[in-house]
Amino acid sequence: MGKISLKVKSAPGKEFSQKITLGEDEYIIASEDLGTARHILTTRVYYKGQIISTYEYDYADALNQADLENRLAEMTRKHHQEAIKSLKREKISQDKTYEEYISAVETIMQNRKPKESFALLTKALEQYPNNPFIFSYQGYLDTMVNRNFSKGIKTCREAFTILREQVPFGEEFFHPVLYLNLGKAYLAAGKKKEAYTSFQKGLEIDPDHRELLRETRKLGERKKPPVPLLERSNLFNKLLGKFFHIFKDKGVK
């Protein structure tokens, strides 16, 4: 992201000041000890002459320790370095694209850490509040982490509307991943029929989509209804299905 380009001045135990460059932006990081009477170390981050961040550390617990001057010098140095690390993390986060957020979420999910993924998506939404893909992933994970089934499914559905508003022509090209997340949200809610339908809609657009194929295989091919001419939800089909299931359990062929 960047490197420390110049140390402006340093007075051990009293002050550390550095100029650092991150990308095309230049910052001044200034740390100082406000004195044992106040026992506060403070670090300020300056950008274009303005203070954009302030970090403070109370070292009252160290006042009675031996060799206080050297200890303060070391504490000030560490406090200064931590402020630089925090600035770099914030800068990287600000510059992260929505694709990078989603990639990070998928990596975290592979390690089976849905809560961490949901927290990252919540942060991503602050930067990309109207991104349909982040919306879709957030809805799915809301059902997984918080068990907010209705809300999560609704969020996944809203992602389609957001995408349609942003890409009025050809938005269906992006639909497979939205159908994937909607299907997963349905699965989390125990709605296998709706999940299967969602996965199938995604496969109609992209028949080779690996994750959609995998999720469909996990659900298994749905058997045809006893009377194909009637809807699966038809009462007669439901009764026949239960009837055949009972005889199957009893070993009747």
Image (cartoon, grey):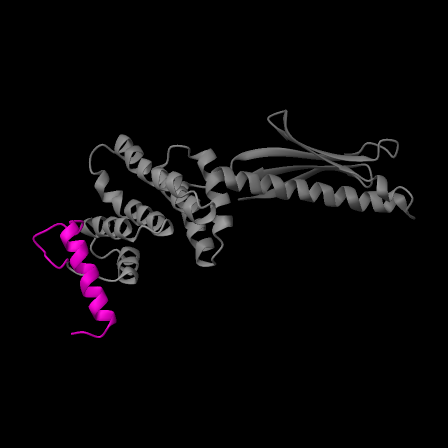
Q: Does the magenta stretch include residue 206?
A: no
Please tell me which residue is depicted at 26% across the width and 55% down the height of the picture: 209
Residue 85 is left or right of residue 143, and the answer is right
Pick the residue in front: 180 or 39: 180
Q: Residue furthest top?
A: 50
Please tell me which residue is depicted at 19% across the width and 62% down the height of the picture: 243
Specify whether residue 222 is in view: no
Residue 158 is left or right of residue 202, and the answer is right
Quadrant holding the C terminus: bottom left
Residue 31 percent across, percent down from the top left: 74, 36
Residue 16 percent across, percent down from the top left: 75, 38
Pick the residue in front: 67 or 40: 40
Pick the residue in front: 49 or 124: 124
Residue 207 is left or right of residue 35, and the answer is left
Q: Residue furthest left?
A: 229
Please tell me which residue is depicted at 28% across the width and 58% down the height of the picture: 210
Q: Give the range drawn in magenta.
A: 225-253
Pick the residue in front: 82 or 139: 139
Specify whether residue 19 is in view: yes
Q: Does the magenta stretch include residue 229?
A: yes
